[in-house]
Image: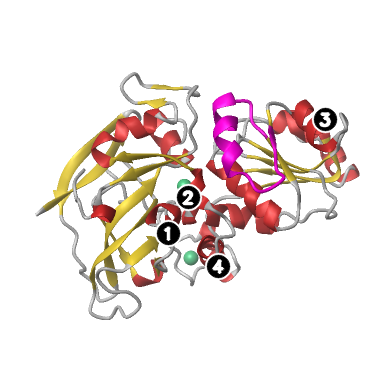
């Protein structure tokens, strides 16, 4: 028997292939029939060639949920038929990075994660071990659960942000999935973030998925005036999900301010060491999950405190994957990547497993 898997060859070169079926080989293996797998900025970077980290021949996709198909002889935590979410980021638990609280930089995880350096979940089936599988309660949809991994990455970043005060003026740049998840997480932390997004299409989609009282604006000036009623409102806490605004935002940070950058685009900027110290600034980055952040993310989804399903703008069958990428501006046919004018946020690739239809 064979199953479908979306293989990465080189930038702009993807193939939906039939590959040998997966079975539980080891005693701790779990094989999952994938239901949904979200398209991440990482995938867009890999496909468009701007984030050259994927191994040629690998199955892409790492934000997935599904239904357990098969388990190894020693697995007791899940059984076939269980609805689950997959943590795609392995760590060994024994290297110095893992033992010192940095599992996201485990030296034994062979590159980055599922769907990048080994086979991921834009596929009918995925195999992992039981520690990386979490069972879903009945009331949580497989669509909502597919956003657990990006939320986990966001919570890792939010843990590192220590606002100077609860009155900190807080800005999130970019209203894509990560921008909106940062907004929710900072809001739950007690801050009152404002969102800055230049794309009308993204702003219009975001309108219905922001926390109560949070607004989005087309520019920093509009946000300062419109949200804080002050054209000179200070930049106390800033999250830049675009990664292209560092040079512009850094000199404008308030003394004691924190600037978090989480985009993965190559962009240099200069830091004046005297200014950094003299103005007590914090500049930092964040990637992947930290210890416990995946379970923390799942808890926020299960408890309904972050309505991740509202961030889903498109669900596209696996066979139609180019349409899913195109919804985010990544046009595989013409090898071009540019913002779209149609509203979008999180795009999920669907295999049809959740409806029992199999191959859509
Ligand atoms: Zn991702
Ligand atoms: Zn490790």
Q: Is mark 4 within 8 Å of ligand 2?
A: no
Category of crowding for the residue at label 4, using alpha-carbon neighbours closer than 10 angstroms: few (below 14), some (14–19), many (at least 20)? few
Secondary structure found at label 1:
loop
* Distance in Å between CA atoms under marks 4 and 3: 38 Å
Which mark is on residue 225?
A: 3
Quarter of the figure that contains the C terminus: top left
Secondary structure found at label 4:
loop
Which mark is on residue 309?
A: 2
Disc 4 or disc 3, which is closer to the eye? 3
Category of crowding for the residue at label 2, using alpha-carbon neighbours closer than 10 angstroms: few (below 14), some (14–19), many (at least 20)? some
* Distance in Å between CA atoms under marks 2 and 4: 22 Å
As drawn, 97 above or below 227: below
Instruction: Indicate the position of residue 154 as horizontal and vertical percent values.
Output: 59, 52
Range covered by the magenta-colored residues: 196-216
Residues tagged 2 and 1 counted as in contact (Cβ below 8 A): no
Quarter of the figure that contains the N terminus: bottom left
């Amino acid at each position: 028997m064979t199953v479908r898997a979306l293989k990465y060859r080189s930038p702009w070169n993807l193939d939906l292939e039939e590959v040998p079926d997966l079975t539980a080989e080891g005693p701790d293996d779990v094989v999952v029939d994938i239901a949904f797998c979200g398209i991440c900025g990482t995938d867009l970077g890999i496909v468009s060639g701007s984030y050259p980290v994927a191994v040629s021949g690998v199955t892409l996709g790492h934000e997935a949920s599904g239904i357990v198909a098969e388990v190894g002889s020693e697995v007791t935590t899940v059984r076939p038929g269980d609805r689950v979410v997959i943590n795609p980021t392995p760590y060994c638990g024994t290297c110095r990075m893992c033992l010192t609280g940095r599992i996201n930089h485990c030296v034994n995880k062979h590159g980055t994660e599922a769907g990048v350096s080994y086979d991921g979940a834009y596929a009918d089936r995925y195999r992992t071990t039981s520690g990386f599988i979490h069972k879903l309660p009945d009331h949580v949809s497989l669509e909502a659960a597919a956003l657990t991994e990006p939320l986990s990455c966001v919570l890792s970043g939010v843990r590192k942000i220590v606002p100077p005060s609860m009155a900190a003026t807080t800005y999130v740049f970019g209203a894509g999935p990560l921008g909106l998840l940062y907004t929710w997480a900072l809001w739950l932390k007690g801050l009152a973030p404002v969102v800055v997004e230049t794309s009308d299409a993204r702003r219009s989609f975001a309108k219905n998925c922001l926390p109560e009282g949070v607004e989005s604006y087309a520019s920093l000036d509009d946000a300062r005036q419109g949200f804080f009623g002050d054209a000179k409102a200070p930049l106390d806490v800033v999250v830049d999900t675009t990664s292209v605004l560092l040079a512009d935002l850094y000199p404008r940070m308030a003394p004691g301010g924190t600037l978090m950058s989480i985009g993965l685009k190559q962009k240099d900027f200069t830091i004046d060491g005297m200014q950094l110290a003299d103005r007590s600034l914090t500049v930092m980055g964040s990637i992947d999950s930290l210890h416990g952040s995946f379970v923390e993310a799942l808890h926020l989804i299960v408890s309904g405190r972050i309505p991740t399903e509202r961030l889903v703008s498109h669900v596209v069958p696996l066979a139609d994957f180019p349409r899913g990428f195109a919804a985010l501006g990544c046009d595989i046919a013409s090898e071009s990547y540019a913002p779209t004018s149609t509203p979008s946020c999180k795009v999920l690739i669907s295999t049809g497993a959740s409806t029992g239809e199999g191959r859509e």
